[in-house]
Image (cartoon, rainbow, N blue to C red):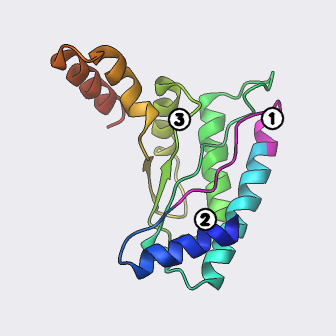
Amino acid sequence: NAWGLARYARSVQESGLVPIIEPEILMDGDHDIKITAKVQEEVIKHVYMACQLNGVLLEGTLLKPSMTVPGANCPDKSSPQEIAEITIRTMERSVPASVPGIVFLSGGLSEEAASVYLNLMNKIERNAKWNVSFSYGRALQHSCLKAWKGSELNSGQNALKARAQANS
């Protein structure tokens, strides 16, 4: 899979576009956050090694990982601060500093939790100066679509403004 992502990234760059590299690591299971971090670190390192071997210009890519959280069925829940710190530590151990941005998936997390984690991550001093943000999907759109329900436009817009404000 790492090789496939690298070939994809190279092909996208050859077409004059910026590849968004998305190594998918599922949140299923009862493992703790330390296991997630270990797996994530190894997978991301393999992806970037394959990118380098395929001649991908790392400065012209974005990484789209999930946040480092315990398995969905883990009985030991991690605090938001621990999730933010371990996520940044995992990224610093595996993502080259030349990558300009990490845009996190929010799937599997509530809008509120994803927003809190991202906010805390951006407060952590880090060596690499990546832009750390969302690759929005569910974390920005879900409450907007739920409020709108295909009827009154203002309700959806108000929900979108509230989500954007929470993440600004």
Image side of residue 129 versus residue 144, left or right: right
Image location (x, y in percent) of residue 161: 24, 27
Work out whether 167 lies above or below 142: below
Which residue is at the front of the view, 166 or 56? 56
Give the residue type that dot 3 points to: Tyr
Q: Quadrant of the N terminus?
A: bottom right
Image location (x, y in percent) of residue 72: 72, 28
Disc on res. 57: none
Q: Earlier in the sequence, mark 1 or mark 2?
A: 1
Q: Quadrant of the C terminus?
A: top left
Kind of element beneath mark 2 = loop
Residue labelled with disc 3: 117
* Contact? badges 1 and 3 (CB < 8 Å): no
Bounds of the magenta segment: 21-35
How far is disc 1 from disc 3 in space, using C-alphas?
17 Å
Q: Residue at x 32, y 23 (%)?
A: 144
Classify mark 1: residues with Cα within 10 Å, few (<14), some (14-19) or many (20+): some
**Count of numbered marks:** 3
Residue labelled with disc 1: 32
Residue labelled with disc 2: 95
Q: Quadrant of residue 29?
A: top right
Q: Residue at x 21, y 24 (%)?
A: 157
Q: Earlier in the sequence, mark 3 or mark 2?
A: 2
Work out whether 15 lies above or below 145: below
Q: Residue at x 70, y 42 (%)?
A: 26
Give the residue type that dot 2 points to: Val
* Contact? badges 3 and 2 (CB < 8 Å): no
Kind of element beneath mark 3 = helix
